[in-house]
């Protein structure tokens, strides 16, 4: 359902709108101390926008004396405007984000509230959320954001029809993956689809290999910026393995020119041009919408990333986006902070919102939704995703969110070079150590 323009403000719809003009256009939904209740900025675009707006509407209806005014932005515009607003002391009361490295920069600048004691006082709120969602909300042992919305682990998808055609089984180990590569290539089928031009798609391979080989400790050392973390022997092994896969022609020819934004990588899987694809949980909905009967016929298979022989990572470990996150501006008034905290306690992931996320093919990060998942037309996949997230011994946040924005850009640039075989694993490690090590 479209949200009427008279009900909520939409910004960033036109390219090239100056940030200063956009902030001025916010009116009462701009700076946190503007009065008239709390303010909340988040991303537009359906169906997610409708779910977020519905949660605000439900809260406002239940709390006539505690109102939240929401403003929506396009993705790229939001990333620019929220950083500018926070830096200028004009942040909304509720700050929507991805946690991780960006949240850490806000914390270091004293721009967001420490919610640790609040969660201690509202333990029932914390207990109903996936435990794995809190790592990206935590900085130096303190909680600065409320995990919200949905979980998006990275999943290994495969085309069952292609596997049957070639007469092979899904991989149960890294060695199996390497053994499958020549078998698919011999039949003119790419072993893996990859939208390499988008860079972050390549990153998912490294994240899983780092975990499966070295365990979560190697992953965490990188996120925490430990000196020379990228040069850990397990990390170098992982970097070598991904280059071995490239050299073996494991990815679709020309993968560096394929973009994930156009869903071209998804199409390669459901049309049978590629046998497998490593991608986020959101991929399921794309294939369901664009792949004809690919999903409904049962041709889509999915599994977690297999183990690497001799590796330390637990098979339950996963990577991706553990949740989305809500922080409270430290510059907000006492009244606005109270409204925001009441929203965290009684407005986030209530029954109606959780059901809407499920109806959209997503898994909310709330524990105890198994019955709702079972009633969905995508019940098997949603339960699979729920189990990954709720049972994960470690859930590594995507590096481009976990690292600082500057380090993340260096990472993505070097990942392209690594996959193009233009730099060695050792050079990759040196370049990343230079921007992430303390």
Image (spheres, rainbow, N blue to C red):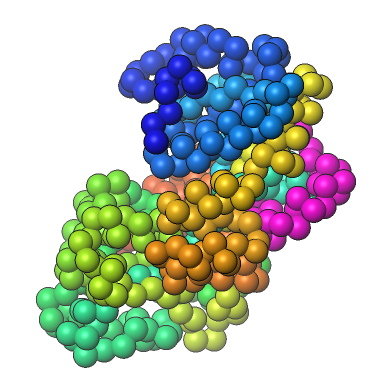
Residue under the image location 44 percent in, 33 percent down: 44
Q: Position of residue 221 (x, y in %)?
A: 65, 60
- x, y percent for residue 238: 47, 71
Side (left or right) of 337 relative to 74: right
Image position of 124 with respect to 89: above or below: below
Residue for point 50% across, 50% down: 357
**Is residue 121 covered in magenta?**
yes
Is 107 or 382 nearer to us in this picture? Answer: 382
Q: Toward which corner of the image does residue 29 lie, by quadrant? A: top right
Range of magenta residues: 109-136
271 on left or right of 242? left
Count of numbered marks: 0
Q: Is residue 420 above or below residue 41?
A: below
Q: Nearer the viewer, residue 223 or 10?
A: 10
> In which quadrant is the N terminus drawn?
top left
Is 130 covered by the magenta stretch? yes
Quadrant of the image occupied by residue 91: top right
Which residue lies at the image location 21% right of the left edge and 79% below the top edge? 161
Q: Is residue 111 visible?
A: no
Image spot of residue 341 (x, y percent): 75, 35
Secondary structure, magenta segment, majority class:
helix
Residue 338 shows up from this direction: yes
| Residue 363, horizontal then vertical, whole percent | 52, 58
Residue at image point 20% right, 79% down: 162
């Amino acid at each position: 359902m479209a949200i009427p323009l008279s009900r909520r403000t939409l910004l960033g719809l036109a390219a090239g709108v100056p940030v200063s003009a956009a902030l001025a256009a916010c009116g009462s939904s701009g700076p946190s101390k503007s009065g008239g209740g709390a303010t909340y900025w988040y991303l537009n675009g359906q169906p997610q926008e409708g779910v977020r707006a519905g949660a605000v509407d439900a809260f406002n209806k239940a709390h006539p004396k505690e109102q939240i005014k929401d403003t929506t932005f396009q993705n790229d515009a939001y990333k620019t405007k929220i950083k500018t607003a926070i830096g200028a002391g004009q942040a909304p009361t509720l700050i929507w984000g991805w946690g991780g490295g960006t949240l850490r920069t806000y914390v270091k600048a004293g721009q967001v509230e420490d919610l640790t004691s609040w969660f201690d006082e509202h333990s029932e709120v914390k207990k109903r959320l996936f435990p794995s969602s809190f790592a990206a909300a935590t900085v130096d042992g303190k909680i600065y954001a409320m995990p919200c919305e949905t979980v998006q682990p990275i999943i290994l998808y495969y085309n069952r029809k292609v596997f049957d055609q070639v007469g092979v089984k899904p991989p149960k180990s890294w060695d199996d993956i390497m053994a499958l590569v020549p078998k698919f290539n011999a039949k003119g089928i790419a072993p893996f689809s990859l939208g390499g031009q988008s860079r972050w798609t390549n990153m998912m391979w490294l994240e899983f290999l780092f975990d499966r080989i070295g365990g979560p400790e190697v992953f965490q050392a990188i996120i925490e910026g430990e000196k020379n973390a990228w040069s850990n022997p397990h990390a170098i092994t992982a970097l070598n393995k991904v280059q071995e896969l490239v050299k073996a022609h494991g990815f679709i020819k020309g993968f560096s020119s394929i973009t994930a934004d156009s869903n071209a990588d998804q199409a390669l899987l459901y049309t049978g041009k590629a046998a497998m694809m490593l991608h986020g949980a959101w991929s399921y909905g794309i294939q369901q919408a664009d792949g004809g009967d690919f999903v409904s016929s049962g041709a889509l298979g999915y599994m977690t990333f297999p183990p690497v022989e001799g590796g330390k990572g637990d098979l339950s470990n996963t990577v991706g986006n553990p949740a989305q996150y809500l922080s409270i501006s430290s510059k907000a008034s006492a009244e606005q902070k109270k409204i925001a905290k009441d929203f965290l306690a009684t407005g986030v992931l209530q029954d109606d919102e959780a059901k809407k996320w499920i109806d959209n093919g997503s898994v909310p990060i709330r524990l105890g939704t198994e019955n709702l998942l079972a009633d969905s037309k995508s019940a098997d996949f949603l339960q699979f995703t729920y189990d990954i997230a709720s049972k994960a011994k470690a859930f590594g946040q995507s590096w481009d969110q976990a690292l600082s924005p500057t380090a993340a850009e260096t990472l993505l640039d070097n990942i392209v070079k690594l996959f193009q075989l233009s730099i060695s694993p050792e050079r990759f490690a040196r370049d990343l150590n230079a921007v992430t090590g303390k």
